[in-house]
Amino acid sequence: MNPLLACAAILVAIIEGCSRTTLPIEEVETASVEDDAGSVETAAPPRGPIPGDAWLQVGHDARHTARSTASPARNPRRRHTIAVALDEWLIPVLVIDELSRPYVASADSVRAFDSSGAIRWTREVPKVAGVALMGERTVIATTRDGLLYRFDRDGRELGSVVVRTGTHNASAPVIAHDNVFVTYHQDTEWYVCAADSWCTAVGRGASLPTIAPDGTVWVAAGDGLTRLSAKGELLPRLHHFPLHAVVLADDGTPRIVVEDSSRGYGVVGIREDGERTFEFFLHKVIAQPPVVAADGVAYVPSAGGPFAVRSDGTLVWTVEAKTRPSRDFHAWEWMALAGDGTLIVTDETPALHGVLDGRVLYTLPRSGAPLEAGAYNGRVAIAPDGTIYATGPASWKDRVAYIDVYW
């Protein structure tokens, strides 16, 4: 793939954690939804670490496996919807605490809600880019101009620091090894910073950083797949050009999405020396990173529907999308893998699906209009008690985004 095209794709990736214009902070509205028909089974108690890992649980899943330890109800229903003000091009960044309470970064503010969707507190954070939870007490917020704010869980400000000056874009924060990792864009250079330690230039374009258990930092960059040591030292680049953030499997090997001019889009496993361990290509757009299970199976969203690939490159199953993509793009979007193996997936219609072993268990409505050009689709996270949170779709024209809550 042309490195310039890779750089352009990575620009999209970093925008997912950034905003580009500011808006006055608006009141948050919570709307009830009449979707309670049928019985609802109680979600199983969460297993393993709390909160459970999930994509957008930034700081709780620094490897970006999008895997949760909690399981939703077998027959969930949409219970309520939270409407929040929207920055241009920014889907609200969402994290969930051990009490299944969401924290949302959007429109120059960080907001905290209770599990019923009622607002707990709002704090102004100009140019906010993302939010994460650090430890049992601290809320971390990053900004596009290089600041890092700390609040306690009750919204009291604990202080702010300048991580880097002169920046005009930033990713959401990633918490790992008692540090905060952020990608910044400054002039023509991208930097990855460990807030309390170092900042290292990584060249053209850079994704959300991915942190390995040994402290190695992986970044999808326009100049190639980039690694940094735990001390911020630039390691030899690998000649791969991922389109999205790197996902690390349990054995430490990366899973990346690439584009090939003749074979289309593919999910690829690689070793630390850059050699490919497997690859699977298809002529359908892969718009987001894969979900990686404990056994190494990669669940991949595509314009034709999600599919599952083993770590040897063989296809496990595929689900054909019943809706036609409006732009051959974003048909099936963000995914999270529940503890019971259910794959929770959003699509552009907009809907939310539960998929198990290649079979669609349920399809639920989401708020908002079908995805159109100029809008971003939603993302999904599973709370420790099994509650499903799905953000979007949203349009920058309307300046509003929705967070649907299911259990």
Image (cartoon, helix red, strand yellow):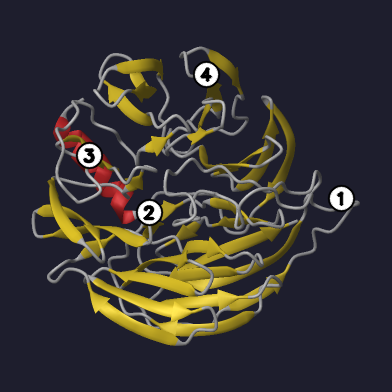
Which residue, as the protein is rendered here, is positioned at the far bottom?
Answer: 156
In terms of secondary structure, where does tag 4 sit? loop
Whole-angstrom CA distance, mark 2 to mark 1, is 38 Å
Residue beneath disc 2 = 374
Please report the residue visible at 58 percent of the width from the left and 52 percent of the height from the top: 381
Neighbours of disc 4 within 10 Å: few (<14), some (14-19), many (20+):
some
In terms of secondary structure, where does tag 1 sit? loop
Neighbours of disc 1 within 10 Å: few (<14), some (14-19), many (20+):
few
Residue beneath disc 4 = 310
Whole-angstrom CA distance, mark 1 to mark 3, is 45 Å
In this image, 195 relative to 329: left or right?
left
Residue beneath disc 3 = 227
Q: Which mark is residue 41?
A: 1
Q: Which mark is residue 400?
A: none
Residue 266 visible here = no
> At which x and y percent is residue 339?
67, 41
> At which x and y percent is residue 348?
54, 44
Quick check: marks 3 and 4 in contact, CB under 8 Å? no
